[in-house]
Image (spheres, rainbow, N blue to C red):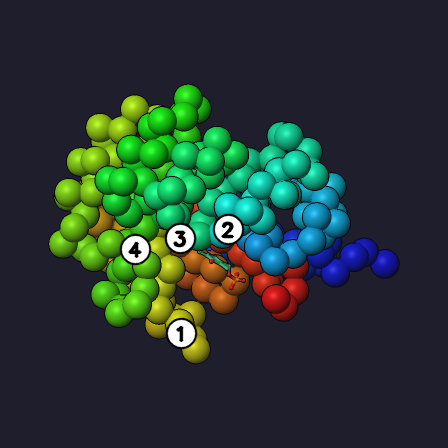
Amino acid sequence: MSSPIAKNLASIQEQVNRACDSVQRNPAEITLVAVSKTFSVVDIQAAYDLGLRDFGESKAQELQTKVHHLPNDINWHFIGTLQSNKAKHVAEMSTTIHTIENERQLREIDKQDRTIDGFIQVNIASESQKSGILIESLDTVLSYVLTSHQVRFLGLMTIGPPVQNPEESRPYFRKLAELNQQANGTMLSMGMSNDFDVAIQEGATHIRVGSALFGKR
Ligand SMILES: *Cc1c(COP(=O)(O)O)cnc(C)c1O
């Protein structure tokens, strides 16, 4: 009997392959970011043993604990709200930050000496109370990112509005892909457990999948 995580991973990979086939993309273009926030070091180690190397965390303290207890060839993706007073420390522990949205974060990231990859988080549906920048601010924030010494700009990221049917996410993903092209982004972070296949069809290169892999939080 294979473990629940192994079964889940197999079915995610099958879904990724199917989504890629449907739009003639190569599955090798897709990075599965296993969103491990709230899950234990044991669960993460199990996913690691199945071959995963990219994990997503949303809190600085939790990330720090996990970094110390897990293998050092893991690529840690920071996907939570990034307080500027923690940005330097988060950058020291991460390979990629998906949630850049202001100049203060960048100034803090630039104070440490590692080069990291960065996505700008966009609030694509202009939802109130949602993190990420509004589309109108993209040019300004992009100019800060492009002048950062330590952040290599990859592209845009979004958390779409909650949907019942994954098809409802498509227009938002399509819009983000368009903006990403205008911004000369080469990577695109979008799609979660319930809609990553639609995100892949719309051009995602990084899908952030938590509950479909590890189970309910
Ligand atoms: C929690 C989280 C995810 C994963 O959500 P699931 O629905 O569990 O796949 C993806 N992206 C971000 C930014 C998150 O906070």
Foreground mark, 3 or 1, reads 3
Q: Where is residue 27 in the image (x, y as percent from the top left)?
A: 51, 44
Look at 74% across and 60% down and name the residue there.
Answer: 4
Q: Where is residue 148 in the image (x, y as percent from the top left)?
A: 27, 29
Query: Mark 1 highlights which residue?
Result: 163
SS label for mark 4: loop
Q: Which amino acid does label 4 sit on?
A: Gly
Query: Mark 3 highlights which residue?
Result: 81
Q: Earlier in the sequence, mark 2 or mark 1?
A: 2
Q: Which amino acid does label 2 sit on?
A: Lys
Q: Position of residue 199 (x, y in %)?
A: 40, 57
Q: Which amino acid does label 1 sit on?
A: Val
Look at 58% across and 49% down and name the residue there.
Answer: 62
Residue 59 got which mark? 2
Please tell me how crowded label 3 is: few (under 14), some (14-19), or many (20+) other residues with Cα within 10 Å: some
Query: Mark 4 highlights which residue?
Result: 132
Per the model, the C-alpha gap separating discs 4 and 1 is 18 Å
